[in-house]
Image (cartoon, helix red, strand yellow):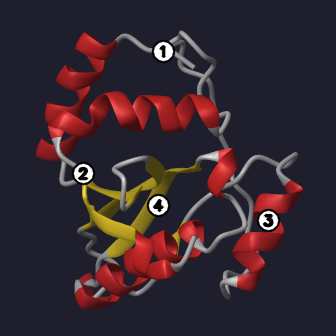
């Protein structure tokens, strides 16, 4: 697939079923765990919180990948915002074709345009291929990532 065969755009509420499919196909969620109606409600809350969901699709409309970008207003760093990327998912059939690279570069460009002083993301320790991918994009391993389970859906 050539880069001209791929469209990168902001996702809409109509894309929620495709986003859920991508999350499941890429292993972020277990197949069948998502409730589409609940996801639409979460979509609205996510958008109100300032999320930018990027969506890559093939010329034939096939979903290829997605990520979510948050620009977080801060007081430290002279008030410069920070950017956070979550939910990076590329369909297994599209991996290795530059889709993830385009999505992340778009997120980096948007974060830079918003005046962010950094863009951060986290990746599970076991996802070594993802780590190599982020290394290739210029991300630097920085500090430690800590999580605490809070009992919500996983």
Q: Nearer the viewer, mark 2 or mark 1?
A: 2
Please say if 42 is above or below 34. below
* Residue 142 appears anywhere in the view: no
Label 2 neighbour load within 10 Å: few <14, some 14-19, many 20+: some
Q: Position of residue 56 (x, y in %)?
A: 40, 60
| Mark pair 2, 4: CA separation | 15 Å
Q: Which mark is residue 11?
A: 2
Q: Residue furthest front?
A: 60
Label 4 neighbour load within 10 Å: few <14, some 14-19, many 20+: many
What quarter of the picture does the N terminus occupy? bottom right
Q: Quadrant of residue 114?
A: bottom left
Residue 137 vs residue 14, the one in the foreground: 14
Label 1 neighbour load within 10 Å: few <14, some 14-19, many 20+: few
Residue that badge 3 annotates = 131
- Circles 1 and 3 in contact, beta carbons < 8 Å: no
| Mark pair 2, 1: CA separation | 25 Å
Q: Secondary structure at mark 1?
A: loop
What quarter of the picture does the C terminus occupy? top right
Please say if 106 is above or below 151. below
Residue that badge 1 annotates = 152
Q: Which mark is residue 85?
A: 4
Q: Position of residue 58 (x, y in %)?
A: 42, 59
Q: Position of residue 93 (x, y in %)?
A: 67, 49
Q: Which mark is residue 122?
A: none
Q: Secondary structure at mark 4?
A: strand
Residue sitting at x 63%, y 19% = 30
| Mark pair 3, 4: CA separation | 14 Å
| Mark pair 1, 4: CA separation | 20 Å
């Amino acid at each position: 697939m050539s880069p001209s065969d791929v469209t990168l755009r902001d996702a809409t509420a109509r894309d929620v079923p495709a986003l859920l499919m991508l999350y499941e196909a890429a292993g972020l969620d277990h197949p069948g765990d998502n409730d589409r109606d609940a996801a639409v409600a979460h979509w609205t809350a996510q958008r109100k919180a300032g999320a930018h969901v990027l969506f890559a699709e093939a010329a034939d409309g096939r979903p290829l990948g997605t990520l979510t970008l948050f620009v977080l207003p801060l007081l430290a760093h002279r008030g410069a915002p920070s950017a956070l990327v979550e939910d990076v998912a590329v369909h297994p059939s599209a991996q290795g074709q530059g889709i993830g690279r385009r999505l992340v570069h778009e997120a980096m460009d948007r974060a830079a345009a918003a005046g962010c002083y950094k863009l951060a993301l986290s990746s599970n320790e076991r996802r070594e291929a993802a780590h190599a991918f982020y290394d290739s994009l210029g991300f630097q391993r920085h500090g430690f990532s800590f999580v605490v389970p809070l009992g919500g859906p996983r």
